[in-house]
Amino acid sequence: MGEKVVAGGFDLSDRQRYRRKLQQCLAGLGRLLAEKRFDRPRNLMGVEIELNLAGGDGMPRMMNGEVLSRIASPDFQTELGMFNLEVNIVPHRLEGHVLDQLAEELRTGLGYADRKAGEAGAGIVMIGILPTLAQQDLVTANLSAVDRYTLLNDQIVAARGEDFTLDISGVEDLHCTSSSIAPEAACTSVQLHLQVTPSRFADVWNAAQSVAALQVAVGANSPFLFGRELWRESRPPLFQQATDTRPPELQAQGVRPRTWFGERWVNSAYDLFEENLRYFPALLPICDDEDPLRVLDDGGVPRLQELVLHNGTVYRWNRPVYGVVDGVPHLRVENRVLPAGPTVTDVIANTAFYYGLVRALAEDARPVWSRMPFETAHENFTAACRHGIDAEVRWPRSGRGGGLVTVPVVDLVRDELLPLAEAGLDAWNIERADRDRYLGVIEERCRQRANGASWQVRTYHRALGAGLGREAALAATTRRYMELMREGEPVHTWPVGFPGPGGA
């Protein structure tokens, strides 16, 4: 990839060859599925968390290279912006005390990283969008010094052919432009992986799409961008607009955005990979020497590198993933809906809710996606992003009557979905005490109508009411968030406002 950058990009023959290789890879995937070559059920899950770097003043710090050198762990890697890091937790079997094990590993790893960042005058912040980010922070010069980010930026900019427009109307309105994809770096998320067999893939993916709105509503943590209060979860519209290769004319024609909810329920993983090839031109047409069909003819397992690379440039909120471990291929559903934070306990609570609910819905004899149009799931997702914990969604009516009913998210989760999530975690053989502890966090958020986004907004307005200006109020909110995040109690217990006389 670095050689391509030095050489000055790609020519027409690169793209034509890449398209042919993609079709070969897709054919190879089809053969692997038909020949039932995939890994046996192993109940494996994994977690990735994107992080921010901020100083004691709450302002972003563009120093991930220095911080990573101090951390010196392969578990921590660069992300798009110089104020970003990512931590990867090794795969675990989804059973027993795995939730508490994940919590302990995250606390240990993040605590260590925070201490190392502190040596450089920064701290780790788990949050969907850092409230103190300014437009001048999200520019090309602040992209991480990694060839793949430079190349990706150049290709997306070239595909679009003009500046990116950020236009989000929420509590307040934001309208500005960017000459690069740098605003995407503001979006820091949690990615939940679940390895599934091909026969189970469609049910799990459809279930994940069904509940994406509920995940966002209870977990929203991104209400601010560039000093404006926007949606309760502003990452999705920001991510879509910051990576949008479509100028307005192509948008008007209905061309699909690369950050995509999708448009239909699926019958197999193949459907999603095939859509990626059919709808989205290559951004990084880098060809591998492997001949996937010949590898299959020889009894081997192809890496399908072109398919994997192309798939990584189509930003589905639930993404199909193909991988090979120890010579055996596997499929995963990568859930990319959730913002990071606020605390490790909150992250694990969101994780428990997702894995439990998806298991229960995927095994339902009358699956929710058979009773709800796909467009309704998409509309629910948008409503949840806009309104967070206060959202209302359309959901299939319980019982045999059928039809959809409009219901507040908090009521739907408490009355119908938490019991399903409990049953799903039981099916995974999760320790009951852990199940109750983490799903109890979700229940309390719903009971109090409180999550990361609501805390940020209430605390920010408390600061404004105390006489602080907009920027000072956002900085004060961020500093207080960092304090409470480090204390580690779940966000529904956080006091609104600030300690001391007049602060609360």
Image: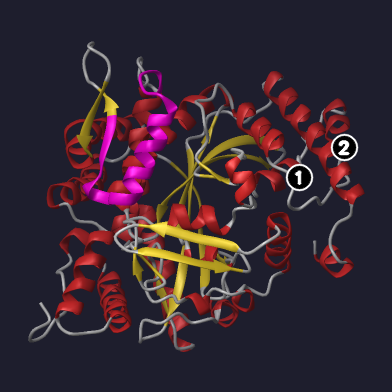
Callout 2 amino acid: Asp
**Number of other residues with Cα within 10 Å of mark 1, as a class: few under 14, some 14 to 19, many 20 or more:** many
| Residue at 52% in and 79% down | 136
Residue assigned mark 1 = 305
Inspect the image, locate mark 1, and give the three-letter code of the amino acid beneath it. Gln
Q: In this orientation, which residue lies closer to the viewer: 232 or 329?
A: 232
Q: Residue at the location (40% across, 56% down)?
A: 339
Residues under labels 2 and 1: Cα distance?
10 Å
Task: Provide the secondary structure element on which disc 1 rests.
Answer: helix
Q: Position of residue 372 (x, y in %)?
A: 37, 23
Left or right, 217 with respect to 444, comes to right
Residue 489 appears in which quarter of the rendering?
bottom left
Give the image location of residue 381, x and y in percent: 38, 41
Which quadrant of the view contains residue 405?
top left
Magenta-colored stretch includes residue 387:
yes
Image quarter of the N terminus: bottom right
Q: Position of residue 416 (x, y in %)?
A: 21, 30
Determine whether, in the image, residue 190 is placed left or right of residue 62: left
Residue at the (42%, 58%) spot, across then down: 168
**On the image, numbered disc 2 is attached to which residue?**
291
